[in-house]
Amino acid sequence: MSDFDRLAPTRRAALGLLGAAAVAGTLASCSQPGTGAPTADAPVTAETVAEAPEVPAAPETPAVPTFARDFQVPPIQGGLVPVITRVTTKNPIVFLTIDDGVTKKPEAIELLRKYGYPVTMFLTKNFVQEDPEYFRQLMRDGDFVENHTVSHDVSMSTKSYPYQLAEIKGMQEFAQATFGRRPTLFRPPGGAYSATMRKACADAGLRAIIDWETKANAGHMDYQYGNSLRPGDIVLMHFRPEFAADLAAFRAAHLAAGLTVVNLEHFLGVE
């Protein structure tokens, strides 16, 4: 099994640390009069060396944790994509997924960058088409846009195959044209799916349906099983006005559980 090394807690923080180190080095090399540091007019002596202030060592970039990929996406069987609600893994990891794209607050991007969280964005065409640049900001940090249909019809799973295929393919084509990548994962509006939906996903070129067993909602965590996060949990969030409160609840939960937030697509191998 191969290791992957695109893990969030340090991906953005590392850049910040490298920048800080560069600044520290530049400042250290600029001697100021009266500091005791040697100048062109002051020869280096034992005394001047002793008086020179110590330059703090540049902070070391934290080591990036790596985890062996111990889960494989099941194959498409009988023309139906698999459904994944949780990743079976022995690694202490958790996945953060954010849906819809209705609310586009700069604060959300700032917080995700502050904590270095990789996210999977399940976006709906009708919610994001007026401002796709908002989501491109996160893509430039290495995040992925996945398929959450054209219109977010929560009753979609009960409708005809042609209707579902059009909803799914419409978002596939929009994502390719707008974000430069064809999604590999699909999330049903409201979470409900059917055999018809699974076939439509397969026919649209998707690899799997991704549901969830836990979510951050209204500033707290909701669990379908137990009362804490488990390794391999796929957490649902939304781009909503209460984003900051939801992310705070998620952060407290994953830290309490000792889990590292990693990228879903990279771990599944469906980039």
Image (cartoon, grey):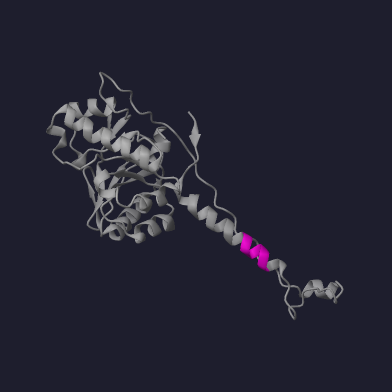
Question: Residue pushed farthest top?
Answer: 78
Q: Residue at x 24, y 40 (%)?
A: 150
Asked if residue 151 is among those painted magenta in the image, a careful observer would answer no
User: Which of the 4 quarters of the picture holds residue 195?
Assistant: top left
Residue 221: % across, % down:
25, 52
Asked if one can make out residue 127 in the rendered structure from this viewpoint, the answer is yes
Residue sitting nearer the eye, 216 or 139? 139
Horizontal side of residue 231 vs 11, given as left or right: left
Give above or below for 2 relative to 108: above
Q: How many numbered marks are there?
A: 0
Residue sitting nearer the eye, 178 or 66? 178
Residue 70: % across, % down:
41, 31
Residue sitting nearer the eye, 26 or 258? 26
Asked if residue 26 is among those painted magenta in the image, a careful observer would answer yes
Horizontal side of residue 107 vs 66, given as left or right: left
Give above or below for 245 relative to 212: below
User: Which of the 4 quarters of the picture holds residue 49?
Assistant: bottom right
Q: Which residues are drawn in magenta?
A: 22-27
Q: Residue at x 45, y 45 (%)?
A: 142
Residue 244: % across, % down:
31, 60
Q: Residue at x 30, y 51 (%)?
A: 130
Q: Main secondary structure of the magenta part?
A: helix
Q: Residue at x 32, y 53 (%)?
A: 250
Residue 55: % across, % down:
69, 67
Residue sitting nearer the eye, 245 or 183? 183
Horizontal side of residue 109 vs 52, given as left or right: left
User: Which of the 4 quarters of the picture holds residue 203?
Assistant: top left
